[in-house]
DNA sequence: TTGTAAGCGTTATCAA
DNA sequence: TTGATAACGCTTACAA
């Protein structure tokens, strides 16, 4: 491994001068610079990151902390973060916070080698715990969750208005009797979406009856089970809003297996717009969750936070969900 | 940030002793060890990874180099690698080799901070280039590709026998007229699978006619286009084998849109077993690609390679595809 | 069993 | 415009 010292020796200059050439800092004579630069190129010198980090200069690492990488949702998130980080010449570390690895461990382990920039996705910790983490880490950005105390560090989706938008779309297509298949996880997302949906219909004088709201694990099976429950109870509805595409597709398939036509008899909407929404039959109408873009944004924000005074960033970082209309919702009236 | 020196000072011992306690190396008196350990715990000491890597020349990092992380396939791969690496107390870096970032850059950038373990997924470089990379990096493992010169560093799937297995399944269910929707990428996987398929049918005295073999981009659209081409040409077949699940589902949907019943009139098989295979209608019968397991295996192998003499590992690392039977293939005769 | 001292590759400080 | 020198936190001969 070729080092600064070796270059310096061959060039007949000091290591300091070589360092200056490499980093473009300080004054270096033109002849000298050219000679050293040529050596650097010819010998294929690469700086040792560990030494650099140790010597005090920041290391330009960005760490991703998420529950896992298998699901397409987190994969897209990681992709967005990673692309933006690499654009900004940062190296990307991933630190899963799964059962063996707590979030605190994951974050600390990132800190251990001077990883100042962290994008965290977590729904388990309490607000206070997250705030504590944020205070300890200037470059920490929270994604997919909003905590008002650290609003300028949160990149999140307005779930409530996403719920309203879904409700509006159904209403404008003539749907008045709605069922909901929601996630049973005790986090704010399902509540917020449900709130938005209810809010919209309420304003139209329509109440969604509680028997038409099912809670289940946000998985294919959860969608299947909920659909069957609705069908068996003979619930009265023309459209279902599911918590995510996975549940929606599970439900859609189950309804069809039970003999219902989708969307002719039952319309279905999802959330997220992952790949399965474009491969199901019928194709799923859904509220797109711009997770890749949000990942990119979060990475940039984190890097910005470590370069600037955190307090100087006061804008909010709220993303909006957009409707992706496909085939799974029936037009009962011409939408206005 | 609390350092070894500070602990040493407070404990009234030398930094060396503290280091010994931390690493469990060398002899340390019992009293001394307890005292130091308590301090370490109480003060929440965490070793500086950069310093450790610098001083010790080893860092216990594992790097993943893949084209991207968005697709569920790579996501699962990354997940497998990451889980195994974390189990082995390694830190995981991801280094995408996308357009801006060549593979060489990605690998070198991993080396820059002493990342000895690398799992590489690449189909673009030539064999020679990969071999060069492998020679330069003792801990490099190649996944999803076989190069005989570095056979003990390759973790790969036997695509040829996977093709045979798919063919056998169709044959045993009575299918004699086959169409193939293949990837048009100039890599070995599509060729090997096609070879396996042809080999099996050939042994049964059946030739697959060239007009029934379509090549397209391995995407949803590629599957759609290929299906339409087959249909428009009035090709004569009862079953289609697609290069992957994405193409298979695209084709399956297009066939149905064109009025064909799947599997009653046309049977479809895929490869990979990604999520969409369980959400399509009908559910897709496919050859499972155990990519998560292969990722885990590759990570372990890489770590083993840096601990042992590489040459001492002589076994091959070949995985087999397994059939996942769902609904998209019609039983024309009772399979034996 | 414990400690001293050198060194890993780099950058920062200060002097020349 | 350059160069010594110290320092970053840790490991590891070697010495005691």
Image (cartoon, coloured by chain):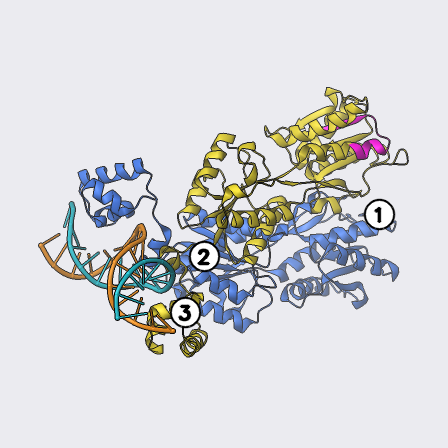
Chain colours: A yellow, B blue, C cyan, D orange
User: What percent of the width, then of the height, locates residue A270?
Assistant: 73, 37
Where, by quadrant of the figure, is residue A6 drawn? Answer: bottom left
Q: Do the residues labelled 1 and 2 touch (CB within 8 Å)?
A: no
Q: Where is residue A98 in the image (x, y as percent from the top left)?
A: 50, 40
Q: Do the residues labelled 2 and 3 touch (CB within 8 Å)?
A: no
Tell me: residue A21, above or below residue B256: below
Q: Distance between the residues labelled 2 and 3?
A: 48 Å
* Foreground residue among B90 and C11: C11
Quick one: label 1 or label 2, which is nearer the N terminus?
A: 1
Residue A100: image tag: none
- Nearer-the-camera pick, A271 or B323: A271
Instruction: Report whether residue B173 is seen.
Output: no
Residue A122 left/right relative to D10: right
- The local secondary structure at tag 1 comes to loop
Q: Name the residue under label 3.
A: A27
The answer to whether any part of residue A321 appears in the image is: yes
> Mark 2 or 3, which is nearer the eye?
3
> Which residue has dot 2 on it?
B301
Query: Numbered disc 2: what chain?
Result: B
Circle 1 sits on which residue?
B261
**Mark 1 vs mark 3: in front:** 3
Mark-to-mark CA distance, 1 and 2: 46 Å
Seen at 64% across and 45% down, the residue is: A291
User: Which quadrant: the N terminus of chain A?
Assistant: bottom left
| Residue B307 highlighted magenta (yes or no) | no
Which residue is depicted at the point 73% across and 44% down?
A: A277
The answer to whether marks 2 and 3 sit on the same chain is no
The image quadrant of residue A253 is top right
Residue drawn 53% across and 43% down?
A312
Horizontal side, residue A125 vs residue B312: left or right:
right
Give the magenta range: A168-180
């Amino acid at each position: 491994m070729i080092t600064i010292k070796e270059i310096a020796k061959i060039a007949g200059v000091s290591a300091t001068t070589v360092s200056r050439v490499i980093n473009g800092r300080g004054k270096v004579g033109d002849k000298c610079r050219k000679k050293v630069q040529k050596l650097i190129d010819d010998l294929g010198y690469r700086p040792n990151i560990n030494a650099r980090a140790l010597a005090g200069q920041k290391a330009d690492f960005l760490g991703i902390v998420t529950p896992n990488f298998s699901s397409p949702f987190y994969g897209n998130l990681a992709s967005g973060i990673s692309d933006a980080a690499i654009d900004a010449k940062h190296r990307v570390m991933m630190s899963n916070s799964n059962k063996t690895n707590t979030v605190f461990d994951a974050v600390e382990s990132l800190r251990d080698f001077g990883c100042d920039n962290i994008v965290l996705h977590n729904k388990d910790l309490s607000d206070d715990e997250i705030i504590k983490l944020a205070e300890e880490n200037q470059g920490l950005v929270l994604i997919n969750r909003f905590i008002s105390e650290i609003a300028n560090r949160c990149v999140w989706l307005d779930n409530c208005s996403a719920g309203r938008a879904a409700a509006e779309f159904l209403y404008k297509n003539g749907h008045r009797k709605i069922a909901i298949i929601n996630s049973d996880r005790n986090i704010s997302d399902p509540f917020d979406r449900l709130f938005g949906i209810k809010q919209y219909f309420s304003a139209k004088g329509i109440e969604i009856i509680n028997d038409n709201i099912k809670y289940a694990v946000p998985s294919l099976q959860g969608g299947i089970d909920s659909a069957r429950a609705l069908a068996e109870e003979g619930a009265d509805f023309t459209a279902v809003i599911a918590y995510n595409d996975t549940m929606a597709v599970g439900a859609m398939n189950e309804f069809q297996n039970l003999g219902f036509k989708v969307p002719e008899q039952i319309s279905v909407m999802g959330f997220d717009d992952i790949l399965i929404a474009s491969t199901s039959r019928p194709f799923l109408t859904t509220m797109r969750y711009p997770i890749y873009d949000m990942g990119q944004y979060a990475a940039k924000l984190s890097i910005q936070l470590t370069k600037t005074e955190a307090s100087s960033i006061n804008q909010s970082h709220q993303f909006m969900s957009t409707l992706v209309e496909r085939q799974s919702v029936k037009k009962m009236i011409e939408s206005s």
